[in-house]
Amino acid sequence: MIRSAVFCCALLLCLCGCAVAPHPTATKTAPLAFTATDGRRCQPLNPQGRPASVLVFVLQDCPICNAYASRIERLAARFAPRGVQFYLVHVDPSLSDADAAAHAKEYGYRFPVLVDRAHMLVKRLGVSAVPTAVVLDRKGQVQYRGRIDNRYFALGKSRELATSNDLRQALDSVMDGKPVQVARTRVIGCAVPDLPQTGDAR
């Protein structure tokens, strides 16, 4: 009976990407875990059997990030049936969960929303500007890091339509088991804010 319960919990975590659970006991080898704004516990760097994961780093008041909201949500909906898990990662260390949840509701995000107050994910994945998308494969290896597309090509300059859909193309390649043709692209947007000097960011 105990083995069956453990198996069911593991299966639920694998299928949903996040699970409602108490804080796990911290260990040196434990993967990074965050509580999403809806209360679920998530391990965004742990593939958990998924073919790919996408972390999209944003600032709630960055105009370029917010301009991409509908595009990001469409990509999440497009790849969800193929088992890809999206996470929205806020990088403002002062942002409350309530404000992050309100932002998600305003812009129509329906996948897990995390607040990286200590910049643990920012540092681990080398993010310096937003919006940055990071694609992980089934082994948790970074296969793509950069812009969502090339609609914005310089500060204050944009095309009406993108001519290079970098994130979508990277995901297509990962899902097809092929190398990503362009694994790094330059992000046009807003700088990731510094952590507070007090060190009390989390």
Image: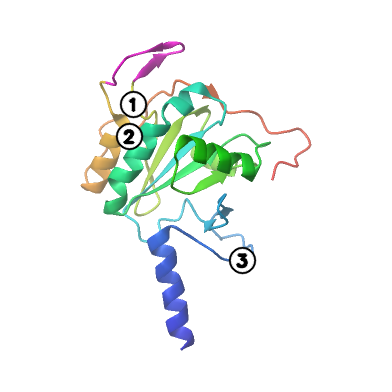
Q: Residue furthest top?
A: 157
Which segment is the magenta one? 151-162
User: For residue 172, which numbered disc appears in the image?
Assistant: none
Is 166 on the left or on the right of 46, as rendered? left
Residue under the image location 45 percent in, 56 percent down: 46
| N-terminal-most mark, 3 or 2 | 3
164 left or right of 36 in image: left
Looking at the image, tell me whether mark 1 or mark 2 is earlier in sequence order.
Answer: 1
Specify few, some or many for label 2: CA neighbours under 10 Å numbering under 14, 14-19, or 20 or more. Answer: many
Q: Is residue 48 above or below residue 150?
A: below
Total number of numbered discs in the rendering:
3
Left or right of 184, for residue 172: left
> Where residue 174 sits in the image (x, y, percent)?
27, 45
Asked if labels 2 and 1 touch by Cβ distance under 8 angstroms, the answer is yes
Q: Tell me, yes or no, whether the highlighted magenta stretch contains residue 112.
A: no
| Disc on res. 167 | 2
- Location of residue 71 by image quarter: top left
Query: Residue 127 appears at what percent x and percent y?
Result: 51, 33
Q: Secondary structure at mark 1?
A: loop
Residue type beneath disc 1: Asp
Whole-number angstrom distance, CA of label 1 to CA of label 2: 7 Å
Q: Is residue 3 left or right of residue 137?
A: right
Q: Amino acid at mark 3?
A: Pro
Residue at position x 40%, y 51% from top? 140
For the residues marked 3 and 1, what is the alpha-carbon distance in whole angstroms? 37 Å
Q: CA distance from mark 3 to mark 2?
A: 33 Å
**Considering the numbered disc 3 on the image, is that residue within a helix, a strand or a loop?**
loop
Query: Who comes first in sequence, dot 3 or dot 1?
Result: 3
- Residue 152 lies within the magenta run: yes
Residue at 41%, 28% in the rendered image: 68
Residue named by callout 1: 149
